[in-house]
Image (cartoon, rainbow, N blue to C red):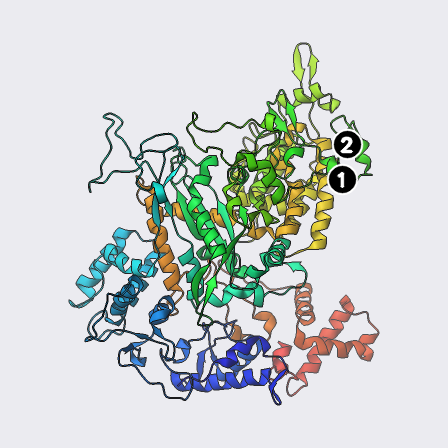
Amino acid sequence: MAPSKAWMDLVDERISEECLDGNISKKDIYLAGVKKFLDYAFNRTGSSDEIKCPCIRCCNTYSKSRGEVYSHLKIFGIIGNYRFWYHHGEVLGEPETDSEIEEDGGSYEITEEEGYNGMEELMMDLFPQETNPISNTMTAPTPNEEYEQEPNVEAAKFYRLLEDLSQPLYEGSSISKLAATVKLLNTKNLGKWSHKSFSMLVELLRKDFLPDNSTLPNSYYEAKKIMKELGLSYIKIDACHNDCMLYWKNDIDAQFCKVCNRSRWKKDKHSGEEIVSAKGKKIPEKTMRYFPIKPRLQRLYMCRKIASFCTWHNEGRVDDGVMRHPADSKAWKHFNDTHPSFASEPRNVRLCLAGDGFQPFTNMKTSYSIWPIFLVPLNLPPWLCTKQQNIMLSMLISGPEGPGDAIDIYLQPLIEELIDLWDNGVDTYDASTRKNFTLRAALLWIVHDFPAYGNLSGHSTKGRLACPVCHKETWSLWLSKGKKFCYMGHRRFLPNDHKWRKNKTSFDGTREHRGPPKPLTGDEVLQQVNDLEEVVLSKDPSKKTKISHSERGDNWLKKSIFFRLPYFSTLLLRHNLDVMHIEKNICECIIGTILNIIGKTKDNINSRLDLQEMNLKPHLHPIEDNGKTDYPRAPYDLTTEQKNKLLQFFRDLKVPDSFSSNISRCVNLKERKLSGLKSHDCHVILNHILPFALRGLVPTNIYAPLVELSQFFCTLNSKALSTQQLEQLESTIPSTLCKLEMEFPPSFFDPMMHLPVHLASEALIGGPTIYRWMYQFERQIKFLKSLVRNMAHPEASIAEGYLAYEFITLCSRYLDDMETMHNRPGRINDTSDHEKFYLPEFSSSGRPLGAGKTRDLDMVELQQGHIYVLRNCDEVQPFISEYTSSPEGSQLQQFTPLWNQNFIVWFKEKVLTMQRGRYGNLTAAALAK
């Protein structure tokens, strides 16, 4: 009988002296619980030496002695969600108190001989209504029981799964059919097997390794049937080929589009007849796959392995004025103040939405675009918030062309479900508290790259008013030779008395008297787009509503469908500028210009002619000499020798493992260019490497602003941000951009070079950029691309593969006895044997790469190493203090070469004369070593 686990709730109070009852403190209650746990664990496991340590540091991975486990649980605390002590002998259904529990004749219980595989916990979490809340056992119908009516869908699922759970893999087996199937599917997922290879394996197992009465599925198709009982599903909704409408709700039986009158079904190119599948069904031209979010949000709380983390933002977060999580941001707090009824329930979910298109085929020349829409629960703690398994796919918009501005047509089911989650919520079972509650959800912000910004927000990111933050007040200039707009005018963001505001010659030839533009509030946006509510969104040119930006005076294309959400206009930060793509474009712009890479440089013939036409920077104007045009070398243009030095720097660059990819592969010394950089490569170069690479190669007036730009992004991308830091960045970035305006031509300033002026102010509202950029979603897109098995039907492959992934993600949380995606070691498993070292300074994790080499240290190196260890070893600090105050040491300045040499001699003599070290098990001989 397991002891009470109430003491585990005091893990955060294990050092508290606060008393609960009489003179008993929370600390005493916790430590008493630890002792009872140790008595129980050693008794049930039958071990007299070691048990698995369930502290936060060891996570049931390492076996320790009783004293070590007690110390770890006292210092580090026990794993919060380890409520079922499987590793320490507890069996399912075992009561926690000494009271007798009346057993129901039809209950399913697991015995000690059957072993544990986690499937019972999974069943209890997914079907709480079928679980006995007193004995924590699952109730199955007795053979003679007669139903007055048929069980509902969920109950029927439960009974089918319970049958698989109670059915052994073969007669006498300790593992059930369900557990064996789940474990095999988990291995298939980790090993990235094909469906065919999985079917071949189970066929081989059934034929040659298992008895004839084995219940193992015959193929992946049969295993998939079991998987669907535990997994979730999606809905297929047909759409018009021109993205005019969805065939759903009242239009579910329509045969033609009510906007463009195009047929719903595919037709043969030659005969013009509708194509019919082998099953006799018509094939729609376009189908969207929608993954309902209500059951997926319910799963967050139904799974006991993660339910307790969903309220971390309210219970585990430290509010010290530093922004480390979206819950620390102004946007989150303003939302709570504006909607107190929503904020009163900490289990209500705040969501981040992200969308982007990708090409699913390996042949990049094929034109095809699939658009997934993701949702991320922001309630989770930082170490889970951006993990792949917690990013939910809510929608898959099929190709071959992206939806463009008509994406609002496809978002209708999602918006309706979000409205219902806001107004009514959904009944949800919380496995951490074992209570039901009404779960509500709200969209906090949206993440996308810059082109998708225009599709989702309705504000075009092209043309004269491309900046969505500056809106009507965007400053742009048309370059007649370059045939594009440039975006400068950053003096507006400087203080009113700044001297550069009056400097005409260094900038665009004018004085600047305007102030910075003010971002639009949600209500102001609604006022500007109210007349666009009836705009027809279609790819049919004859039906699509044409918007004249010059007549309107703004860049709005539509009223975004997100404004249907009752709270959307109250959000402080509705759409985020994606730092990932901004960094990539700026890095490529800088490198392409200073290396003068053809097709990448912003300093070309047209840019020089534009300078001449604008009468700016006379030293860069083209010079006519005897019928030939000479273009003076710009100060930022590197010479051939300097280019070779810069490229050789990148060729020889070595960085820590996983810090970046191999940048040297992008270097082409022959053509003197750097190409093929990935987004993260550009991030690393711009944030960390660029100042070192350009040192001594460019003049100070070029080098200084580039270093300032690098420092700006490095600070902006910190995991922890303070308001003071961001306010300083907000005040310095305009000066940096103005310095670049003085040196680089106007063609250098595309929209991406202008957007950094707004990033610090957005971080002040939204918090750290790691929750508001596209990196985690780009990784998820790469995963979706790997799910394409059938090239003729990529969307169907992705949808089915994602359902299988959802199933494995859920089940693998309960598979503690095997490697899963949640507990698998990293690519480099840096573990070390802590017990063979005397001092903790030598027990840090890590291992050498490659074969080791041995050499003798000279006397200087030996002395340096010796004194370094002594100065950084806590056990030696009292000896240093004693020697410093002694007559020998007081005459010498501390840590000078002579002091070091004399201290080592004194220290060895001191410890060798001691019979026992003054720190427990630490002997004098150990210190002497």
Percent position of residue 504, x then y: 79, 28
The residue wearing badge 2 is: 512
Residue 240's disc is none
Q: Secondary structure at mark 2?
A: loop
Relative to 431, residue 585 above or below: above
Q: Quadrant of residue 205?
A: bottom left
Q: Residue at the location (36% across, 59% down)?
A: 808
Image-based side of 8 in relation to 865, left or right: left
Please state which amino acid type lies under the numbered disc 1. Leu
Percent position of residue 600, x then y: 57, 30
Percent position of residue 437, x then y: 46, 66
Q: Nearer the viewer, residue 176 or 127?
A: 127
Please state which amino acid type lies under the numbered disc 2. Glu
Q: Secondary structure at mark 1?
A: loop
The residue wearing badge 1 is: 494
Q: Nearer the viewer, residue 736 or 257?
A: 257
**Residue 152 appears in the picture as rendered:** yes
Tally the numbered discs: 2
Considering every residue shown, the one lying at the far top of the view is: 626
CA separation in Å, label 2 and label 1 = 10 Å
